[in-house]
Image: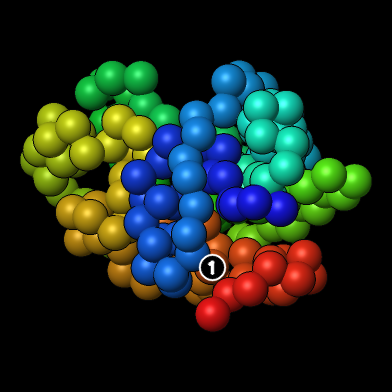
Amino acid sequence: MEEIILASASPRRAALLKQIGLSFRSVRSPYQESPVKVEKMVGENALAKAEKVFLLYPHSLILGADTAVICEEIIMGKPRDTSDAVKMLNMLNGKEHRVITAVALMEKGRARVEQEETRVFFREIEEEEIYSYAASGEPWDKAGGYGIQEKGAVFVKRIEGCYFNVVGLPIALLVKMLKEYNWPIW
């Protein structure tokens, strides 16, 4: 293997990989995600993203990931516009939701997919906060319409599970998987 390639243009995933000192390159995967049962969907999407980039870089270790937010069994993707962001935030308001991220690693001859789930509890949010946040533009590229690592943190009362999973890449799970691939972490 010559390098790790992140099959994503996500600035949050790139920041998390930099945070733990991994050397990598980001390549946006041309894969178009498709909705099915959420636990199956995130795994299939993460693997398909990795597969598309693997075709371009067959001598590299490819990392694909996909995150979904689920509230009351409704899968929330990224908001299409301000109105959609407001709708999502209203749905999450004062409630618990789940964040599931699948991580796929692929290299010549093998692929592996694992998932992490975190429970997130939102406080009661005032209507003006929802509209102001939605209008800020921050929700656009985030499943569920908020970023826990940014201003959206003010909505989160508590979490149960991996914080980094909510950001978009469960670091402990990724490191475990990289070790199974004999990839040097330090």
For image coordinates 36% across by 56% down, the residue present is 15
Foreground pick, 55 / 149: 55
- Say above or below: 80 vs 163: above
Inspect this view and state whether residue 45 appears.
no
Q: In the figure, is residue 104 to the left or right of 7?
A: right
For image coordinates 54% across by 72% down, the residue present is 161
Foreground pick, 82 / 59: 59
Mark 1: few/some/many CA within 10 Å (<14, 14-19, 20+): many
Q: In the figure, is residue 137 to the left or right of 88?
A: left
Q: What element carries label 1?
A: helix
Q: In which quarter of the image is the C terminus?
A: bottom right
- Say above or below: 48 vs 96: above
Q: In the figure, is residue 70 to the left or right of 102?
A: left
| Residue that label 1 marks | 171
For image coordinates 41% across by 56% down, the residue present is 167
Q: Residue 61's x, y, as percent?
A: 68, 50
Q: Which colour scheme is used?
A: rainbow
Query: Outermost residue, right direction?
Result: 109
Q: In the figure, is residue 135 to the left or right of 18?
A: left
For image coordinates 50% across by 34% down, the residue present is 27
Query: Outermost residue, bottom direction?
Result: 186
- Say above or below: 82 vs 93: above
The amino acid on which the numbered mark 1 sits, given as a three-letter code, is Ile
Inspect this view and state whether residue 82 appears.
yes
Q: Residue 109's x, y, as percent?
A: 90, 46
Residue 182 location, quadrant? bottom right
